[in-house]
Image (cartoon, grey):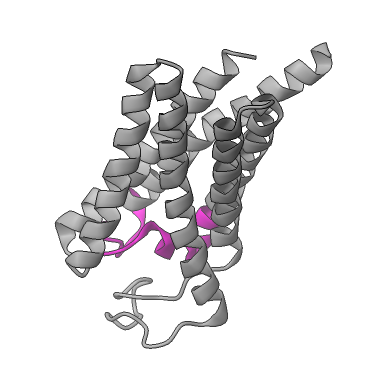
Amino acid sequence: MKGNTQLTKLMLTGGIIGGPIYIIIGLAQILTREGFDMTRHPLSLMSLGDLGWIQITNFIVTGFLVLLAAIALHRLAQADKRWRRGAFLIGLYAVCIIGGGIFVTDPALGFPPGTPDVYPKTFSWHGLLHFIAGQIAFLSLIAASFVYGKYFAVNQMRKWATFSRLTGGIFLAAIIALMATAGMAWASIFLYIAVALGWVWLSALLIRMRARV
């Protein structure tokens, strides 16, 4: 029993550090990769070029860490349906992040340098799978934040409920803004902020849940 408890804590700890790893490696690349502009380019484009292996590894490793944490959450869920649903959605988020690393996106908007400065007219098969995985990942995390928001509200943890729902609301607003403005600079930055907030919320949630083990 003690061994199972320690394993569960270890799996949750992996998920906790997944967020900081993703953000730090992503930020380091934004600041150093030639030709990358976060007001125009999604982070997925970092998977391309000679240094693309860095972001591919970032996707796969952080996704795997979060997947382990989701499995641990499911083990802790017991009879609580909201907790189980939240664990499933976080697991789906993790699988899609891993998929984002396995299925590399297509060049776009002049990145990597030397490629056409336009969106591709057609997707490659792996580019299409990357796009689908990315959309499902975003929606899964948003849904998870609202599910856990409801869980915290029912259990009278109002600050956590507010934090969870606010995270989901901001993330959803960022996606809508990017679509509505056809990728204007401020909307692109807004989405980067929302993604970072999503990772912060996820790490905080796992810290909270680990304390209950």
**On the rendered structure, is 181 left or right of 93?**
left
Question: Residue 67 appears at what percent x and percent y?
Answer: 63, 42
Q: Quadrant of residue 88?
A: top right
Q: Nearest the camera: 56 or 9?
A: 9
Determine if the magenta segment contains residue 184.
no
Vertical arrangement, residue 127 with respect to residue 204, above or below: below
**On the rendered structure, is 172 left or right of 47?**
left
Q: Nearest the camera: 76 or 31?
A: 76
Image quadrant holding the N terminus, namely: top right
x 38%, y 71%: residue: 112
Determine if the magenta segment contains residue 48.
yes
Image quadrant holding the C terminus, namely: top right
x 37%, y 83%: residue: 120
From this viewpoint, is residue 191 visible? no
Q: Which residues are magenta?
A: 31-57
Vertical arrangement, residue 199 with respect to residue 1, above or below: below
Q: Nearest the camera: 47 or 88?
A: 88
**On the rendered structure, is 209 left or right of 121?**
right
Q: Nearest the camera: 99 or 88?
A: 88
Question: Residue 63 appears at what percent x and percent y?
Answer: 58, 46
x 56%, y 75%: residue: 126
Question: Residue 202 appears at what percent x and percent y?
Answer: 46, 33
x 21%, y 58%: residue: 177
From this viewpoint, is residue 159 visible? yes
Q: Quadrant of residue 43?
A: bottom left
Question: Residue 85 appears at what percent x and percent y?
Answer: 57, 40
